[in-house]
Amino acid sequence: LSPALYPHRNMSGKHITVVIDILRFTTSLIAAFENGVSAVIPVASLSEAENLSKQGYPVAAERDGLQLPFADFGNSAADFNTDAVRGKTLVYSTTNGTGAMTMAAGNGPVAAAAFANLPAISDWLYTRNENVVILCSGWKNLFSAEDALCAGALTGMLLNLGTWTLNGDEAGLAINLWNLHKDNLKEALTSTSHYRRLIGLGVDPLPDYTVRTGISDVIPVYTGGIIKNINER
Ligand code: MLT
Protein backbone atom coordinates (compact mmCIF):
# COMPACT_ATOMS: atom_id res chain seq x y z
CA LEU A 1 0.00 0.00 0.00
CA SER A 2 1.66 3.20 -1.20
CA PRO A 3 0.12 6.65 -0.88
CA ALA A 4 1.75 8.97 -3.44
CA LEU A 5 1.26 12.49 -2.16
CA TYR A 6 2.14 14.30 -5.35
CA PRO A 7 1.24 13.24 -8.87
CA HIS A 8 4.47 13.18 -10.84
CA ARG A 9 5.48 9.69 -9.80
CA ASN A 10 6.90 6.70 -11.55
CA MET A 11 4.94 3.78 -10.10
CA SER A 12 5.98 0.52 -11.66
CA GLY A 13 4.39 -2.92 -11.36
CA LYS A 14 0.80 -4.03 -11.58
CA HIS A 15 -1.49 -2.48 -9.00
CA ILE A 16 -4.82 -0.78 -8.50
CA THR A 17 -4.42 2.99 -8.53
CA VAL A 18 -6.86 5.12 -6.56
CA VAL A 19 -6.83 8.70 -7.83
CA ILE A 20 -7.87 11.50 -5.46
CA ASP A 21 -8.70 15.04 -6.57
CA ILE A 22 -10.88 16.50 -3.83
CA LEU A 23 -11.10 20.00 -5.37
CA ARG A 24 -12.68 18.94 -7.57
CA PHE A 25 -12.49 16.18 -10.17
CA THR A 26 -13.01 12.95 -8.19
CA THR A 27 -15.64 14.57 -5.93
CA SER A 28 -17.53 15.79 -9.01
CA LEU A 29 -17.12 12.48 -10.85
CA ILE A 30 -18.86 10.64 -8.01
CA ALA A 31 -21.62 13.29 -8.06
CA ALA A 32 -22.04 12.78 -11.82
CA PHE A 33 -22.61 9.04 -11.33
CA GLU A 34 -24.96 9.76 -8.41
CA ASN A 35 -26.98 11.88 -10.84
CA GLY A 36 -27.32 9.06 -13.36
CA VAL A 37 -24.38 9.40 -15.77
CA SER A 38 -23.90 5.95 -17.28
CA ALA A 39 -20.19 6.25 -18.22
CA VAL A 40 -17.39 8.81 -18.41
CA ILE A 41 -14.60 9.09 -20.96
CA PRO A 42 -11.66 10.95 -19.37
CA VAL A 43 -9.51 12.74 -21.91
CA ALA A 44 -6.22 14.47 -21.24
CA SER A 45 -6.33 16.94 -24.13
CA LEU A 46 -8.81 19.74 -24.78
CA SER A 47 -8.69 19.20 -28.55
CA GLU A 48 -9.92 15.64 -28.02
CA ALA A 49 -12.68 16.89 -25.70
CA GLU A 50 -13.73 19.49 -28.28
CA ASN A 51 -13.79 16.89 -31.08
CA LEU A 52 -15.99 14.61 -29.01
CA SER A 53 -18.24 17.57 -28.24
CA LYS A 54 -18.68 18.11 -32.01
CA GLN A 55 -19.60 14.43 -32.29
CA GLY A 56 -22.48 15.06 -29.89
CA TYR A 57 -21.12 13.91 -26.53
CA PRO A 58 -21.96 16.02 -23.48
CA VAL A 59 -18.63 17.42 -22.26
CA ALA A 60 -17.33 18.65 -18.92
CA ALA A 61 -14.08 20.56 -19.41
CA GLU A 62 -12.02 22.72 -17.07
CA ARG A 63 -8.60 24.36 -17.23
CA ASP A 64 -7.05 26.44 -14.47
CA GLY A 65 -10.35 26.25 -12.55
CA LEU A 66 -12.65 27.58 -15.25
CA GLN A 67 -15.15 25.89 -17.57
CA LEU A 68 -14.11 25.92 -21.24
CA PRO A 69 -16.47 27.85 -23.58
CA PHE A 70 -17.24 24.79 -25.76
CA ALA A 71 -18.14 22.62 -22.74
CA ASP A 72 -21.63 21.85 -21.44
CA PHE A 73 -20.44 21.52 -17.84
CA GLY A 74 -17.62 22.74 -15.65
CA ASN A 75 -15.92 20.70 -12.95
CA SER A 76 -18.22 21.26 -9.98
CA ALA A 77 -20.28 18.55 -8.27
CA ALA A 78 -23.17 21.04 -8.44
CA ASP A 79 -22.96 21.11 -12.27
CA PHE A 80 -24.25 17.53 -12.43
CA ASN A 81 -27.25 18.12 -10.24
CA THR A 82 -29.46 17.94 -13.34
CA ASP A 83 -31.43 15.39 -15.34
CA ALA A 84 -29.45 16.45 -18.43
CA VAL A 85 -26.72 13.88 -17.67
CA ARG A 86 -28.99 10.91 -16.87
CA GLY A 87 -28.16 7.85 -18.99
CA LYS A 88 -25.45 9.74 -20.91
CA THR A 89 -21.79 9.02 -21.61
CA LEU A 90 -19.96 12.13 -20.47
CA VAL A 91 -16.58 13.26 -21.81
CA TYR A 92 -14.46 14.84 -19.05
CA SER A 93 -11.21 16.80 -19.14
CA THR A 94 -9.63 18.69 -16.22
CA THR A 95 -6.29 20.32 -15.42
CA ASN A 96 -4.93 17.52 -13.22
CA GLY A 97 -7.42 14.81 -12.26
CA THR A 98 -8.27 13.32 -15.65
CA GLY A 99 -4.57 13.35 -16.59
CA ALA A 100 -3.68 11.46 -13.39
CA MET A 101 -6.30 8.83 -14.23
CA THR A 102 -5.23 8.26 -17.81
CA MET A 103 -1.52 8.32 -16.86
CA ALA A 104 -1.99 5.56 -14.28
CA ALA A 105 -3.99 3.26 -16.57
CA GLY A 106 -0.90 1.36 -17.79
CA ASN A 107 -0.49 -0.24 -14.35
CA GLY A 108 -3.99 -1.71 -14.05
CA PRO A 109 -7.47 -0.50 -13.07
CA VAL A 110 -7.77 3.09 -11.84
CA ALA A 111 -10.47 3.93 -9.31
CA ALA A 112 -11.53 7.37 -8.08
CA ALA A 113 -11.96 8.29 -4.43
CA ALA A 114 -13.20 11.35 -2.56
CA PHE A 115 -14.64 11.84 0.91
CA ALA A 116 -18.08 10.98 -0.51
CA ASN A 117 -17.25 7.33 -1.30
CA LEU A 118 -14.65 6.52 1.35
CA PRO A 119 -16.01 3.43 3.07
CA ALA A 120 -17.34 2.05 -0.24
CA ILE A 121 -13.95 2.29 -1.91
CA SER A 122 -12.03 0.74 0.99
CA ASP A 123 -14.49 -2.18 1.12
CA TRP A 124 -14.02 -2.74 -2.61
CA LEU A 125 -10.21 -2.64 -2.32
CA TYR A 126 -10.42 -5.18 0.49
CA THR A 127 -12.31 -7.63 -1.73
CA ARG A 128 -9.73 -7.15 -4.53
CA ASN A 129 -6.77 -7.85 -2.22
CA GLU A 130 -4.11 -6.40 -4.57
CA ASN A 131 -1.30 -3.87 -4.31
CA VAL A 132 -2.73 -0.36 -4.09
CA VAL A 133 -1.23 3.02 -4.98
CA ILE A 134 -3.21 6.03 -3.76
CA LEU A 135 -2.36 8.79 -6.22
CA CYS A 136 -2.98 12.39 -5.19
CA SER A 137 -3.61 14.54 -8.26
CA GLY A 138 -2.18 17.74 -6.78
CA TRP A 139 -1.88 20.86 -8.87
CA LYS A 140 0.44 20.92 -11.90
CA ASN A 141 2.76 18.33 -10.36
CA LEU A 142 2.79 19.96 -6.94
CA PHE A 143 1.41 18.74 -3.60
CA SER A 144 -2.19 19.57 -2.64
CA ALA A 145 -3.17 19.30 1.02
CA GLU A 146 -6.81 18.43 0.31
CA ASP A 147 -5.81 15.33 -1.66
CA ALA A 148 -3.29 14.25 1.00
CA LEU A 149 -5.99 14.61 3.69
CA CYS A 150 -8.27 12.20 1.88
CA ALA A 151 -5.31 9.88 1.16
CA GLY A 152 -4.66 9.81 4.91
CA ALA A 153 -8.29 8.96 5.67
CA LEU A 154 -8.29 6.14 3.11
CA THR A 155 -4.89 4.80 4.18
CA GLY A 156 -6.09 4.66 7.80
CA MET A 157 -9.21 2.76 6.76
CA LEU A 158 -7.22 0.27 4.70
CA LEU A 159 -4.72 -0.32 7.50
CA ASN A 160 -7.60 -1.10 9.85
CA LEU A 161 -8.70 -3.82 7.45
CA GLY A 162 -5.33 -5.46 8.01
CA THR A 163 -4.41 -6.82 4.57
CA TRP A 164 -1.68 -4.42 3.48
CA THR A 165 1.80 -3.42 4.57
CA LEU A 166 2.96 0.12 4.01
CA ASN A 167 5.52 1.19 1.47
CA GLY A 168 7.46 4.40 2.19
CA ASP A 169 6.99 7.28 4.63
CA GLU A 170 4.16 9.12 2.96
CA ALA A 171 1.48 6.98 4.62
CA GLY A 172 2.41 8.14 8.13
CA LEU A 173 2.48 11.76 7.00
CA ALA A 174 -0.95 11.49 5.37
CA ILE A 175 -2.51 9.73 8.37
CA ASN A 176 -1.10 12.36 10.75
CA LEU A 177 -2.50 15.14 8.56
CA TRP A 178 -5.92 13.48 8.52
CA ASN A 179 -5.93 12.97 12.31
CA LEU A 180 -5.03 16.62 12.78
CA HIS A 181 -7.93 17.91 10.65
CA LYS A 182 -10.64 15.25 10.59
CA ASP A 183 -12.83 17.07 13.11
CA ASN A 184 -12.70 20.33 11.16
CA LEU A 185 -12.51 19.14 7.58
CA LYS A 186 -14.31 22.11 6.07
CA GLU A 187 -11.92 24.56 7.73
CA ALA A 188 -8.92 22.55 6.57
CA LEU A 189 -10.18 22.59 2.98
CA THR A 190 -10.81 26.34 3.07
CA SER A 191 -7.17 26.97 3.98
CA THR A 192 -5.77 25.23 0.88
CA SER A 193 -4.19 27.08 -2.03
CA HIS A 194 -6.58 25.60 -4.59
CA TYR A 195 -9.57 26.73 -2.53
CA ARG A 196 -8.15 30.28 -2.60
CA ARG A 197 -7.43 29.98 -6.32
CA LEU A 198 -11.04 29.02 -7.08
CA ILE A 199 -12.44 31.74 -4.80
CA GLY A 200 -10.26 34.25 -6.67
CA LEU A 201 -11.87 33.07 -9.93
CA GLY A 202 -15.37 33.50 -8.54
CA VAL A 203 -15.95 29.73 -8.54
CA ASP A 204 -17.61 27.95 -5.58
CA PRO A 205 -14.84 25.52 -4.55
CA LEU A 206 -16.77 23.71 -1.88
CA PRO A 207 -20.28 22.57 -2.63
CA ASP A 208 -21.54 20.78 0.47
CA TYR A 209 -21.13 17.48 -1.37
CA THR A 210 -17.33 17.76 -1.03
CA VAL A 211 -17.21 17.44 2.76
CA ARG A 212 -19.95 14.88 3.27
CA THR A 213 -18.05 11.69 4.04
CA GLY A 214 -19.53 8.30 3.21
CA ILE A 215 -22.65 9.49 1.40
CA SER A 216 -22.06 7.52 -1.81
CA ASP A 217 -21.57 3.88 -2.80
CA VAL A 218 -20.35 4.88 -6.25
CA ILE A 219 -17.02 3.29 -7.21
CA PRO A 220 -15.81 4.81 -10.48
CA VAL A 221 -13.27 2.54 -12.17
CA TYR A 222 -11.36 3.34 -15.36
CA THR A 223 -10.45 0.39 -17.59
CA GLY A 224 -10.30 0.08 -21.38
CA GLY A 225 -10.69 3.84 -21.95
CA ILE A 226 -13.93 4.29 -20.03
CA ILE A 227 -14.99 4.97 -16.42
CA LYS A 228 -17.96 3.03 -15.09
CA ASN A 229 -19.54 2.82 -11.67
CA ILE A 230 -18.76 -0.80 -10.85
CA ASN A 231 -20.96 -0.67 -7.74
CA GLU A 232 -24.19 -0.04 -9.63
CA ARG A 233 -27.25 -1.53 -7.99
C1 MLT B 1 -8.27 19.31 -11.64
O1 MLT B 1 -8.57 18.20 -12.13
O2 MLT B 1 -7.24 19.87 -11.94
C2 MLT B 1 -9.14 20.00 -10.63
O3 MLT B 1 -10.25 19.26 -10.36
C3 MLT B 1 -9.27 21.45 -10.98
C4 MLT B 1 -10.57 22.13 -10.62
O4 MLT B 1 -10.79 22.48 -9.45
O5 MLT B 1 -11.40 22.36 -11.50
Image: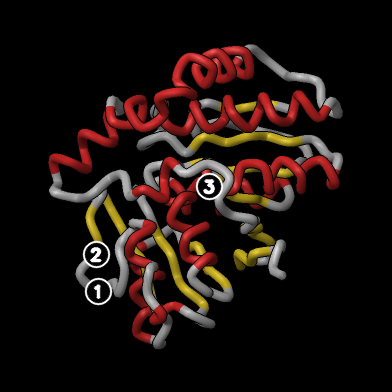
Front in this rendered view, residue 171 or 143: 171
Quadrant of the frame with the C terminus: bottom right
From the image, tell me which residue sits under label 3: 116
Question: Which dot marks residue 70?
Answer: 1
Colour convention: secondary structure
Q: What is the CA distance from the residue labelled 1 to the residue labelled 3?
A: 29 Å
Secondary structure found at label 1: loop
Say left or right for 96 vs 162.
left
Which residue does the image show at 48% across and 70% down from the upper left?
A: 35
Q: Are marks 2 and 1 in contact (CB under 8 Å)?
A: yes
Which percent across, then down, holds residue 85? 44, 78
Q: Is residue 95 above or below residue 172?
A: below
- Give whichever of discs 2 and 3 has the lower sequence position: 2
Which percent across, then down, holds residue 15? 76, 41
Inspect the image, locate mark 2, and give the three-letter code of the amino acid beneath it.
Leu
Crowding at label 1, few (<14), some or many (≥20) Cα neighbours within 10 Å? some
Which percent across, then down, holds residue 23? 37, 43
Crowding at label 3, few (<14), some or many (≥20) Cα neighbours within 10 Å? many
Secondary structure found at label 2: loop
Secondary structure found at label 3: helix
Q: Mark 2, mark 3: which one is toward the viewer?
A: 3
Say left or right for 112 vs 2.
left
Front in this rendered view, residue 27 or 41: 27
Inspect the image, locate mark 1, and give the three-letter code of the amino acid beneath it.
Phe
Q: Is residue 85 above or below residue 118?
A: below
Q: What is the CA distance from the residue labelled 2 to the residue labelled 1?
A: 6 Å
Q: Is residue 155 above or below residue 36?
A: above
Quadrant of the frame with the N terminus: top right
Say left or right for 162 vs 81.
right
From the image, tell me which residue sits under label 2: 68
Q: Are marks 1 and 3 in contact (CB under 8 Å)?
A: no
